[in-house]
Amino acid sequence: MTPVLSKGGRCHPYAGRMSNEAVYTAEATSTGGGRDGHVRSSDGRIDLDTRIPKSMGGNGEGTNPEQLFAAGYSACFLSALNLVARMAKVQLDPATSITAKVGIFKTPEGGFDLSAELDGYLPGLSQEVADDLLEQAHEVCPYSNATRGNIEVTVKARV
């Protein structure tokens, strides 16, 4: 397999063309009580009630920020995985998937923190190739770049 990244290196589809101008900006507004409220994207594609999960004392009858974060992270990471696989000329099985688990924890200071676990299922590849591709995807994924150094993120490959 041809390496897409050198150790510690970065690969980006807009390398050398980056500017301070976003190529896309998502916008969503929360109303009500935040975790017990409503969230809607500016285009209306997301229009959901938010509720505190049962495990945190709520009724759990709506989505929550951690579910939305996990959904976004898994989709973004799978896109990054497809990019690095394509660049390495590795064919991914259509059943390839990324499952993101986002946990929320109380901090000793009384606040909260997050952690994320990314479980990649890459059937048909060797464990070594799968591990390498996930490591490279973790370097280019915008969610991984945003969380790096801020929260604990673990990445695991299953074949």
Image (tube, rainbow, N blue to C red):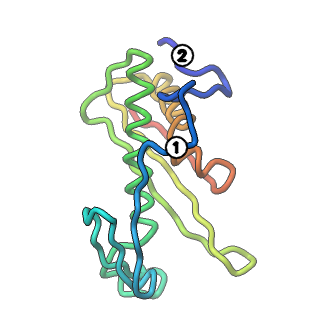
Residue at (56% x, 37% y) in the render:
19
Residue at (57% x, 47% y) in the render:
154
Horizontal side of 97 relative to 116 (left or right) equals left
For mark 2, what is the residue? Answer: 3
Q: Is residue 72 above or below residue 8?
A: below
Spatial CA distance of label 1 from label 2 is: 29 Å
Residue at (43% x, 57% y) in the render:
70
Residue at (70% x, 81% y) in the render:
110
Q: Secondary structure at mark 2?
A: loop
Q: Is residue 24 above or below residue 67?
A: above
For mark 1, what is the residue? Answer: 21
Q: Earlier in the sequence, mark 1 or mark 2?
A: 2
Instruction: Give neighbour class at mark 1: few <14, some 14-19, many 20+ (Cα, 10 Å).
Output: few
Residue 40, image quadrant: bottom left
Q: Position of residue 64 (x, y in %)?
A: 40, 73
For discs 1 and 2, the disc positioned in front in the rendered view:
1
Horizontal side of 72 relative to 2 (left or right) equals left
Q: Is residue 103 above or below residue 132?
A: below
Q: Position of residue 117 (x, y in %)?
A: 51, 52
Instruction: Give neighbour class at mark 2: few <14, some 14-19, many 20+ (Cα, 10 Å).
Output: some
Q: Position of residue 43 (x, y in %)?
A: 28, 62
Q: Nearer the viewer, residue 27 or 91?
A: 27
Horizontal side of 4 relative to 9 (left or right) equals left
Q: Amino acid type of disc 1?
A: Glu
Q: Nearer the viewer, residue 39 or 27?
A: 27
Q: Secondary structure at mark 1?
A: loop
Q: Amino acid type of disc 2?
A: Pro
